[in-house]
């Protein structure tokens, strides 16, 4: 066999091996969304996100200060729009988050807290492809909403029980939740139980 032919065969073998490794990584545990990404997958995903974030976005500084008003606005916004997947405490331990692949990150963890303000803002505005993180830039008519969320993400490690309780009032509720809440309020108000009249 001539040298060019050996190189081509060797290159083809390397490509086939890499494709097999990639398929094994992708298909570990089948295509189940309940699987946990491998450490290699997590590393590659973080690296790809870093490469995809424009350099000028990484260096952008938050124009807002963590005032009580800004943190309050962000806390309520997070409770209504973000906590469904991320949880009020930012842990990602929610029914929705548990069913995603990859799972929502713990926003209190060093991997998230070490991101620059500009990176967090960019992720909120543009989302993260191939994950459950949508782009909210088109929903936030004022970019300050996203900057306030960055302030709140920074505050999550110090979130107080009182703040969490306040957030629970702003979490989206389904019909069953609203009915249960109304029954509790009726009970607490000593209201007589409602009886349905039969025709």
Image (tube, grey):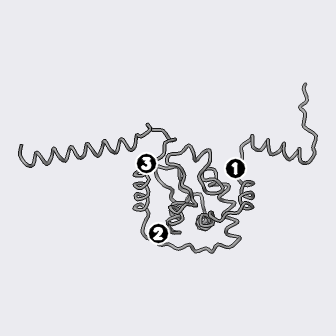
Q: Which image quadrant: the C terminus?
A: top right
Q: Nearer the viewer, residue 154 or 143?
A: 154
Disc number placed over residue 158 in the picture, else none: none
Figure quadrant of the N terminus: top left
* Mark 2 surroundings within 10 Å by alpha-carbon count, few (fewer than 14), some (14 through 19), many (20 or more): some
Nearer to us of marks 3 and 2 is 3
- Measured from the top left, where is residue 117 in percent x and y? 53, 69
Q: Secondary structure at mark 3?
A: loop
Mark with earlier residue (2, 1): 2
Q: Residue at x 60, y 55 (%)?
A: 91
In the picture, measured across the screen, residue 121 lies left or right of residue 40, that is: right
Residue 46: x and y, percent?
44, 58
Mark 1–mark 3 Cα distance, whole angstroms, equals: 32 Å
Quadrant of the rendered image containing residue 168 = bottom right
Q: Which residue is mark 2?
A: 58
| Side (left or right) of 135 relative to 1 | right
- The circle drawn on residue 172 is 1
Specify which label sits upstream in the sequence, 3 or 2.
3
**Which residue is located at x 40 percent, y 57 percent?**
48
Q: Earlier in the sequence, mark 1 or mark 3?
A: 3
| Residue marked by disc 3 | 38
Question: Which residue is at the front of the view, 86 or 173?
Answer: 86
Q: Are marks 2 and 1 in contact (CB under 8 Å)?
A: no
Whether tag 3 and tag 2 are in contact, CB under 8 A, the answer is: no
The image shows residue 62 at horizontal and vertical percentages of 56, 72
Provide the secondary structure element on which disc 2 rests: helix
Residue 177: image x %, image y %? 75, 43
């Amino acid at each position: 066999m001539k040298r060019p032919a050996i190189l081509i065969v060797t290159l083809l073998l390397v490509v086939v091996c890499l494709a097999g490794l990639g398929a094994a990584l992708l298909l570990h545990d089948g295509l189940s969304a309940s699987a946990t990404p491998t450490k290699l997958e997590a590393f590659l995903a973080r690296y790809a996100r870093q490469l995809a974030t424009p350099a000028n976005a990484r260096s952008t500084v938050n124009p807002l200060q963590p005032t009580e008003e800004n943190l309050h606005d962000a806390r309520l916004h997070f409770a209504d729009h973000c906590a469904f997947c991320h949880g009020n405490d930012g842990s990602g331990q929610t029914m929705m988050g548990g069913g995603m692949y990859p799972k929502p990150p713990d926003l209190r963890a060093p991997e998230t807290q070490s991101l620059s303000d500009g990176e967090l803002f960019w992720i909120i505005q543009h989302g993260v492809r191939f994950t459950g993180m949508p782009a909210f830039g088109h929903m936030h008519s004022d970019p300050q909403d996203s900057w306030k969320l960055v302030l709140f993400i920074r505050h999550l490690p110090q979130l107080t029980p009182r703040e969490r309780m306040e957030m629970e009032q702003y979490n989206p509720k389904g019909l069953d939740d609203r009915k249960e809440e109304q029954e509790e309020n009726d009970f607490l108000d000593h209201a007589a139980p409602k009886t349905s009249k039969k025709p």
